[in-house]
Image: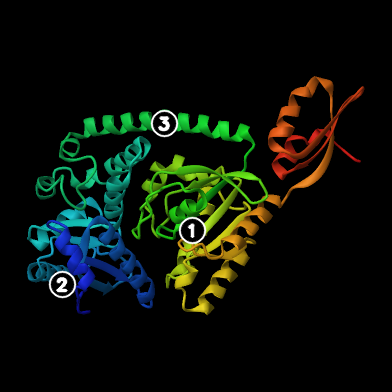
Amino acid sequence: MEEYITEEITEREKLHETSVEEEKKAVCVSIYPQGGEGACLMSLEELRRLLDTAGGSVAAIVTQMRNAPDSKYGVGSGKIEEISDICKNTGANLVIFDFELTPSQIKEIEEAIDADVSVLDRSMLILDIFASRAQSAEGRLQVELAQLKYTAPRLMGKGKSMSRLGGGIGTRGPGESKLEIDRRRLKARVAQLEEELRKVEKNRLTMRAARERSGIPKCAIVGYTNAGKSTLLNRLTDAGILAEDKLFATLDPTTRQFELPSGTKLLLTDTVGFINNLPHHLIKAFKSTLDEAVYADLLIIVSDASDEYAAVQLEVCTKLLSELGAEGKPTLFAFNKCDAVTDTDALYQLKRIANDYNGETVFISAKTGEGLEDFLSALEKLLRSGKKQISIMIPQSKAGLISTLYSKGENVEVDYRADGIYATLVADEKLQGQLGEYIVEG
């Protein structure tokens, strides 16, 4: 049986602890199959950072080698006894499992620990962070919907958990009054939230259509949480977005217009960060936000090149983009925080991964501005990809298309002739498709 690891509190953590009233101390629990220690350590490190973002600290880590969670406790009964002892000895008031728990498992674990301890799983912790970070009306609606669908069924009827709602980790968001309502009213609240989100999404679609009509290319900045996406947008546009060294510092998308050195304009949108094992219900709730990547003309995938797990994080991003239906777009891989990288071999490994996706690659530091000239050159190159000079002949009855040529094309020249309107322009693949029936030779 593995021994638990009691974490040493660093001087930084001591200072942080004194600044947070009644900081939550947690025992983090994980399981792993034989040979899966490395992935387990990565996930636990991420769990530690999630906890830090939520305002808590790690009191101890407990792991167990097993192929699947125990149906009753998630871990073996001996481990539950061990966890109970750790809580008593360290004063931990949270137990967080690095995998999803069922409502019955949470109930059994809380009863077995027999202490004034809250039991959460990874998804509940992420939802808690989202509840504290969402600023826009849409973001708050999305978070509450996700919490009610996932968290509420796990707390309904549990006296111990209900008595603690409202103030700490795992209790933010809907609050006691909403979680104590009966299931019929709970369903009504979910239906109300879904209707409100439909209205918000309708407004978002209207805004998106306006951007389409503008003809300005749309670029989504995506990537793993805390990779530096907001810092990059701030560096490029002075957007003034909060950029912290925390997971999920940005939840609500922000769009700013940016002009490249060549004079080409584009719309840059900062998006919510990805994370390994991002709960599917959260993906569904934030679909309208994540769709910014789906409807973008090109993608900038930002990675923290200084993170020891950067390669795995990049794989998570590309996989999730594929699941969202956003793959196959012109893509610029921006490996950020290169000024903090000491292992140059790791950079080449990242570049090899990017090459597999046929993307452009640059190494930058959004914080210092290092590499931004190369970044802008690569972005210019991507915008030119797929563009070519075409000649078209439009019948007089389709003269309304001329406005489309000027708004979406480049270097447009129009010649009004007796047999129609002749024009030459530089068009991207999308515009070429729109004008396909009118393209002529010479």
Where residue 182 appears, as percent x and y from the top left, is 18, 34
Residue 78 - label: 2
Q: Which residue sits furthest top?
A: 397
Q: Earlier in the sequence, mark 2 or mark 1?
A: 2
Cβ–Cβ below 8 Å for labels 3 and 2? no
**Amino acid type at image mark 2:** Gly
Q: Classify 102 as above or below 349.
A: above
Q: Please indicate, yes or no, whether residue 346 appears anywhere in the rendered image.
A: yes
Q: Classify 343 as above or below 317.
A: below
**Side (left or right) of 16 relative to 99:** left
Q: Earlier in the sequence, mark 3 or mark 1?
A: 3
Quadrant in which the C terminus appears: top right
**Side (left or right) of 291 relative to 134:** right
Most foreground residue, 107 or 365? 365
**Amino acid type at image mark 1:** Cys
The CA distance from mark 3 to mark 2 is 49 Å
Bin the neighbour count of mark 3 within 10 Å (Cα to Cα): few under 14, some 14-19, many 20 and up.
Answer: some
